[in-house]
Amino acid sequence: MKIKFLILSLLIIPFFSGIVFAHTVDSVGEYRVEIGWMNEPVVSGETNAIEFYVSPLEPTLALKDQVFKNGIPELKKTVKIQLIYKDESIMLPLSPDHNIPGKYYAFINPTVSGFYQANILGIIEDTPISLSMHPPKVEERSYIEFPEPTDLTLNQIIDGHTALISDIHNLKKSVKNLEEKSINIGYASIGLALGGISIAVIALIRSKKI
């Protein structure tokens, strides 16, 4: 039993370790700064936000041991986040968390998966900041879709539209064939009528000769 549990643990642990997400921590001047996604794992096509934390550094601790506390408020007007993806960029304003001083949000809907760069620009109190940071990767939306991607709905619409066009084409073809048959029947009727008239004329001429 213990062996089975050990094997199961070895199989499960790597799986979960591959989907663990973390915030990124750095420093500027006397301040600790941290960014990360509000909703993790973050996926493309879903409204999210970059969380931004600012707090004083503790002089006696290394950066890896620093924690967020005593956050710096009132940075909404002095700090912005420039989000970059490949050759495109957007400037995002900060929205403060009203319950946690020093915590801010930069709302965004990342439309494609991949790695984004966040440039922190502005002034923290009297300290200028121009810092590039990298939040965790944005995953493809299909990563969490079940049972099938939402694109299936669009595919169904396209397929249905194609089928409708095919049905209309077949209907037009049937109507055309019917019209052609009707014309042929009409010509046959006229031929029979003319033949009948001819027979009647011949019979009338013969009756007069008698």
Image (spheres, grey):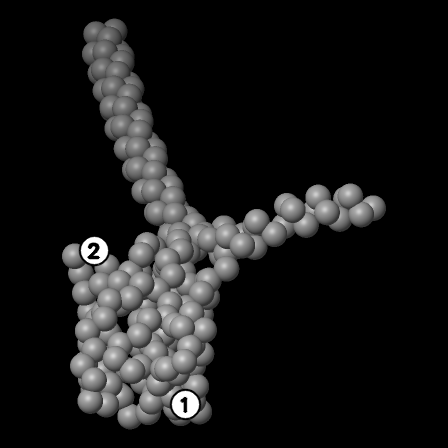
Left of 199 or right of it: where is 55?
A: right
Tag 2: residue type?
Answer: Lys
Depth-wise, is mark 2 or mark 1 nearer the camera? 1
**Is residue 192 at least partly visible in the picture?**
yes
Q: Who's the residue at 23% across and 82% down the image?
A: 79
Q: Circle 1 — which element?
A: loop
**Which residue, given by chain and number where applicable, does mark 2 sit on?**
86
Closer to the camera, 100 or 58? 58
As measured in the structure, the alpha-carbon distance from the residue carrying label 2 to the one carrying label 1 is: 35 Å
Closer to the camera, 144 or 125? 125
**Which residue, given by chain and number where applicable, does mark 1 sit on?**
70
Q: Residues within 10 Å of mark 1 (few under 14, many from 20)?
A: few
Q: In the picture, residue 35 is in which quadrant?
A: bottom left
Q: Circle 2 — which element?
A: loop
Tag 1: residue type?
Answer: Asn
Q: Position of residue 139 (x, y in %)?
A: 40, 56
Q: Quadrant of the C terminus?
A: top left
Measured along the vertical axis of the image, is residue 195 above or below residue 125? above
Measured along the vertical axis of the image, is residue 190 above or below residue 55? above
